[in-house]
Image: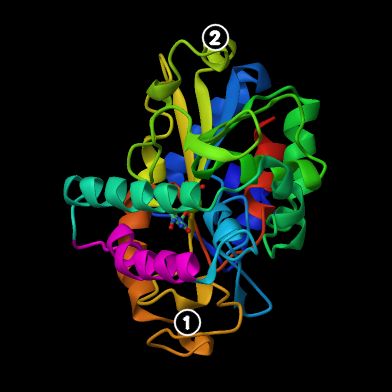
Amino acid sequence: MRPLKMIAEMSKATVHMKDPEHLEQILESIKDSGPNTLQVISDFDMTLTRFAYNGKRCPTSHNVLDNSKLISKTCQAEMKNLLNTYYPIEIDSTRSIEEKLPLMVEWWTKVHNLLIEQKIRKDQLTAVVKESNVILREGYQLFFHHLHELDIPLLIFSAGVGDVLEEVIRQAGVLHPNVKVFSNYMDFDESGVLHDFKGELIHVYNKREGALLNTQHFQEIQSRHNVMLLGDSLGDLTMADGVQDLQNILKIGYLNDKANTHEHLHKGMHTYKCRYPFSHYFSHPAVEERKQSYLDSYDIVLERDESMDVPNAILQYIT
Ligand code: C5P
Ligand code: MG
């Protein structure tokens, strides 16, 4: 039987594909090579975490901090203004990545500087994550456990805040040894107060596995020429660029929304200020507008899907 017919989850209404035959070839080829040739590279925010829950937006790793008691009201307002300015640019399909690049650097730099001003303490992060509304997608346990069991490396490549997202995964009990996180990590001074961010800034449009060259993770994955890539942004598509002698890449993209203002992301669990009421959110024409570009670049597009069902079913099939 054809692979796609054997994977029941592929007939879910949320699943879209431009070229099912090509997808089947990739699936067969990865399956034939076996699990020791596979690595998974995934984005974090809005890919491993839920976009919405009970009709309310869920926070990104940055928002976990923005919405917390660690940040002053004035700073929260400044963050919100930045989000309303730059997020529409991040997801604007009419602008080129080149055009967006400096603006994204500008956004991340401003936000990191604001966070530094807040003198966040390392020992406050556990509580802040616990109190947040961040939720991993349904079926995350199976996803993490399956990869752990088969010893398949999972690289989480995130433009979010490493310390926060690692804590989310730790609290969910799935920070297994096969998981590596590549993200913006906070640098704390000797008294445990945030005074900088470590390494080179990672924003949504400079994600490349090449950035990992010479790291220990890179040594570990050198023999793994097949990649399953998970993302929710077009910027996530380059995450596997540094993989040497890439044989097959299977790209799964979550198509979330396009919002005009993101008031609701900030404390916004309550304050919706989008141009469209939330009930109309998902039939928002802007999603349709982005769908074609997602179909052109991801092998599988998952629209309005808050679960890991499809990635899980694919992993079960190919490993
Ligand atoms: O993990 P991932 O790479 O998806 O994290 C980046 C996401 O965080 C972006 O999609 C962006 O919209 C969001 N972000 C945010 N607040 C910021 C900067 C980025 O919510 N200050
Ligand atoms: Mg994301």
| Residue at 37% over, 55% down | 294
Quadrant in the rendering for residue 146? top right
Is residue 87 highlighted in magenta?
yes
Q: Position of residue 116 (x, y in %)?
A: 48, 46
The relative height of residue 131 versus residue 146 in the rendered view (above or below) is below
Image mark for residue 219: 2
The relative height of residue 296 versus residue 54 in the rendered view (above or below) is above
Image mark for residue 148: none
| Residue at 57% over, 69% down | 13
The magenta stretch is 74-94
Is residue 141 highlighted in magenta?
no
Q: Position of residue 186 (x, y in %)?
A: 55, 37
The disc labelled 1 sits on which kind of residue?
Tyr
Q: Quadrant of the N terminus?
A: top right
Q: How is the image coloured?
A: rainbow
Taking depth in this image into account, of 174 and 248 the one nearest to the observer is 174
Q: Mark 1, residues whose alpha carbon is within 10 Å: few (<14), some, or many (≥20)? A: some
Most frequent secondary structure within the magenta stretch: helix
Q: Quadrant of the C terminus?
A: top right
Image mark for residue 281: 1
| Residue at 32% over, 51% down | 296
Would residue 108 appear left or right of 118 to someone viewing this image?
A: left
Quadrant in the rendering for residue 267? bottom right
Taking depth in this image into account, of 197 and 33 the one nearest to the observer is 197
First reached walking from the N terminus: tag 1 or tag 2 = 2
Q: Confirm whether residue 271 shows in the render.
A: yes
The disc labelled 2 sits on which kind of residue?
Gln
| Residue at 46% over, 32% down | 249
Would residue 69 appear left or right of 222 to someone viewing this image?
A: right
